[in-house]
Amino acid sequence: MASEGAEPGSIRPGGRTARVRESVLRAAGDALAEHGFDRLDLADVARRAEVGKTTVYRRWSTPTGLVADLLDDMAEQSSPRTATGSLIDDLRANARLVATTLSDPRQGPLFKSVIAAATCDPRTAGALHRFYAVRVEEWSGCVTEAVERGELPAGTNAGEVIRAVSAPLYYRLLAGGGPLDEAAADRAAEAAAAAARAGVYVD
Amino acid sequence: MASEGAEPGSIRPGGRTARVRESVLRAAGDALAEHGFDRLDLADVARRAEVGKTTVYRRWSTPTGLVADLLDDMAEQSSPRTATGSLIDDLRANARLVATTLSDPRQGPLFKSVIAAATCDPRTAGALHRFYAVRVEEWSGCVTEAVERGELPAGTNAGEVIRAVSAPLYYRLLAGGGPLDEAAADRAAEAAAAAARAGVYVD
């Protein structure tokens, strides 16, 4: 096993396992983006990751198990939120991040594939919903801080505001209505902020 | 061919063809709702519709062709919009219709299947986008009338407002965040109305 020149004792337990997981999940993401969930095949993923087929089958068992782990990893790895001190700037940063992700040539098809898989598989749907719950929770601070600053009414449901920013962008991805550009992102942020200021998201 | 007791000359040309199409598309919708697009099979649809397999293959050729025709038919058959004379009441009616459709035990899975199919098939995506374009166009009158009444600023993009009503409901269907109930529908309508009043959808 490669020590990567590290001092004895400096390799954390599970270092190789973690590297195998990283390679396999990257390969799974590539395969999903290229061919969709229906054609996701563990042997192909093992080949792409240069990892033994047995390891992949033993650890992930099924394409569904692999996608669930990929989503958990995406949630863990995802970037921290922006904190500009202004609600509209925070929401605009969030919207632009979502629009950039969904129009990325690898990430866009990957999300489409996983959303498609989730429509017919409850385990994938559970993992996808957990992923969004983690992201919504991460960005909710923008809303709670805006409430503390007096920018939004007390009792505003932070999760609802963050989901409102994403919703029109996912709608464009799946149902059409225009490109996922910066104008669409900014409008999504402004719409969520305007509705929040009007008290629509007060529970 | 059955004359259905009609007067001679009163049966429009294509009557039988239209009935065959209706049966086949109903069967296709049932099959999609039950098993999803991946398992949509023309022979199974023909059996369900009690129509000859050859007819189905000759007319629709592929599952993709069948789904595209189903979406075109859904667009043609879909109900006219509500016109209450008040923007918020019109948008609430639209939101409740969308929420009811997406939470219907047949329609919900049918839409999920078609959205999933559209993620990996451009022809289905085209048909799905046309379906939404027809529905958005149908409901846009609520917005243009609100502009005429002075409820909304001049230059408000009607399509953007109507899509904004649907977006959070589709987000709940696919990404989670809560049930597709009347409260969710009313909030979606109120958010779109508040953002529209604030001028967010002025182009």
Image (cartoon, coloured by chain):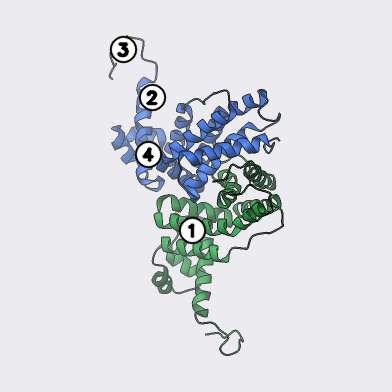
Chain colours: A blue, B green
Q: Earlier in the sequence, mark 2 or mark 4?
A: 2
Q: Nearer the viewer, mark 2 or mark 4?
A: 4
Q: Chain of mark 1?
A: B
Q: Which residue is mark 4?
A: A106
Q: Nearer the viewer, residue A125 or B100?
A: B100
Question: Separation of disc 2 and disc 3 at Cα?
Answer: 16 Å
Q: On the same chain: label 2 and label 4?
A: yes
Q: Three-letter amino acid code at disc 4?
A: Arg
Q: Tag 1, which secondary structure?
A: helix
Where does the image place residue A114, in percent across and percent down from the top left?
Answer: 45, 42
Q: On the same chain: label 2 and label 3?
A: yes
Q: Three-letter amino acid code at disc 2?
A: Ala
Question: Decide: marks 2, 1 in contact (CB < 8 A)?
Answer: no
Q: Earlier in the sequence, mark 2 or mark 3?
A: 3
Q: Tag 2, which secondary structure?
A: helix
Q: Three-letter amino acid code at disc 3?
A: Ala
Position above or below: B63 against A82:
below
